[in-house]
Amino acid sequence: MIGGRLLRIGAAATSLLGTAAVERARATAPERSQLPRRLRLALERLGPTFVKLGQTLSLRRDLLPDSWLVELSRLQDNVAPFPAADARYAVEVALGRPAEQIFAAFEAEPMAAASIAQVHRARLPDGRAVIVKIRRPGIRDQIDRDMRALVAIARLVLVLAPGLRRYQPLRIVDEIWVNLRKETDFRHEARNIRRFREAFREWPTVSAPDAIDDLYSEAVLVQEMSGGRSIGDPSVDGPRLARVLIDAYLHQFFVAGLFHGDPHPGNLFVMPDGRLCFHDFGLVGYLDGRTRRSLAVYLQAFVSKDAAWMLDAAVELGLLGGSIDRPVFTRGIEEILSDFATRPLKDWSLAEAVLRVARLGSGENLVLPQNLVVLVRALFLVESALRTLDPDFKVLDMLLARGGAMMEGVLRGGPPTSASTRLKTEAALAAQDLPGTIASWLHRAQREGGGPLAAMRHASPEAQLDRVGNRLALAIVTLGLYVAASLLMLDSAGPRVLGDLPLFALLGYALAFLSSFRLMRAIARSGRL
């Protein structure tokens, strides 16, 4: 079976390579190329795994031209639903009891069917309306089989076309494989829902339907049913909801570190009470603390129109990597900023700026990890949704007005973290242990007949003690003062000067510097440094 599947995939790949060779020989203009359409049709013929593969590739704005992205975005999960009896059996196996004990009612006809799963309406015994997301039987095995075949084809293609290595196709295929396995494990989606709801627990303007306790597993997810009006409905308060949406994403990017990666109009709707509801957490992005700081710096550099700063921020964020020709890349970013400067402020796009910087260097510096791929997609979709809600919405104005405090908190480190707590603890312990450590070192040196005390056999006791004493004084006084000043800086205690710096910490550093300088000068004069 694997052999026949490999032949089908290989035949499709060979056909596409043949088309590419013919178009290259004929010097076909990119806008007249048939390759994007043929790729979409080939993926649809190869079945659900490759439809998902194409949909995932449609996220890769950093790799593919716009014409390819448009064509791949047309891929649809046009698959027939699997039988209701199979759906009920899958639910009973996954949740460990008969469907009649789980649901008061279960609709046999699915409300939606896709390549990975299908969704049924149901009602719980307590009367709550829910949706039941059921993984398509055998889809995990099919994905693994198809992806192994794709890896084999990719290796062969690299042998025939080594120039493609710069796009790291094997790494991309491996990323897609990992993410497809996550997407088919509904426990990940349930955890994402819970994390999102926790992040917005105190927000009266944002909602997400919860996963039902004890009713989700790897293959089944039971979730509250929720509905409302589309964000494109003329009756909704677009300007208000635009502010809610930008606030929600600023909170996701710079505070929660988890964000909804697919905010297209089908996944956003307005509930009857006016809350903005997020639906479908199959695609979620994650930003660790370092990435959040880098994103905040990049945004500030973009708003400041500082090309050199943007380049540094892009490298730190991970948009660019490898060998960087700074003058060339700085000029490229200056051209991007000049282009934006000619547009009305409402047409400025952070998403476009991120993507255009990532595309600098004709693909030689493409290193986007998956979290940034999802980030770029989310940025584009958020900006599109904002303009649907309010065509005159000025994204940058709102980012500065609403996001300033969040970004400042990220850049300054926000509230005390485990890292700062650890530093304070370790510094205090080091200060406590310092005298004992030095005494132990002196004892060991004397016992072993080496170290600074051994030289007493060749020099006067007074001279040697003077030398050792000076060194110990320098170590103890300097380290003690610097540790104390650092603790004061971390605690941010007392009055502040020079903007926002703790006065007592600055005094501590000044005393430490003066003490070090005086001791260094005295030791240097003695000739025994």
Image (cartoon, grey):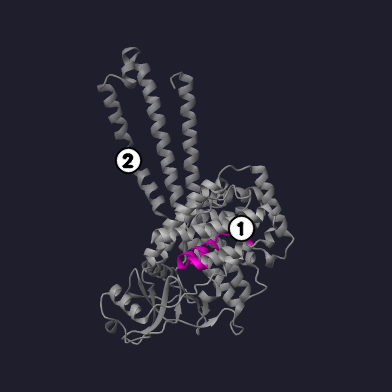
Work out whether residue 216 or residue 89 is closer to the camera in this orientation and state it.
89
Q: Is residue 346 magenta?
A: no
The extreme right residue here reads 342
Q: Is residue 46 magenta?
A: yes
Work out whether residue 381 or residue 199 is closer to the camera in this orientation and state it.
381
Task: Estimate the x, y position of residue 361 in percent, counting from the top left.
Answer: 63, 48
Q: Is residue 388 left or right of residue 221?
A: right
Identity of the residue drawn at 54% across and 49% down? 316
* Residue at image mark 1: 19
* Dot 1 amino acid type: Thr
* Quarter of the figure with the N terminus: bottom left
Decide if residue 320 is in sight here.
yes
* Residue at image mark 2: 432
Is 184 rendered above or below residue 304?
Answer: below
Decide if residue 260 is in sight here.
no
Identity of the residue drawn at 32% across and 84% down? 103
Q: Is residue 388 left or right of residue 505?
A: right
Work out whether residue 141 or residue 96 is closer to the camera in this orientation and state it.
141
Task: Estimate the x, y position of residue 468 in percent, counting from the top left.
Answer: 37, 23
**Alpha carbon separation for disc pair 1 and 2:** 73 Å
Task: Estimate the x, y position of residue 448 in percent, counting from the top left.
Answer: 26, 21
Residues packed near mark 2 inside 10 Å, few (<14), some (14 to 19) or many (20 plus):
few
Magenta-drawn segment:
44-66
Residue at disc 2, secondary structure: helix
Q: Main secondary structure of the magenta part?
A: helix
* Quarter of the figure with the C terminus: top left
* Dot 2 amino acid type: Gln
Is 248 rendered above or below residue 15?
Answer: below
Task: Estimate the x, y position of residue 119 in percent, counting from the top left.
Answer: 42, 78
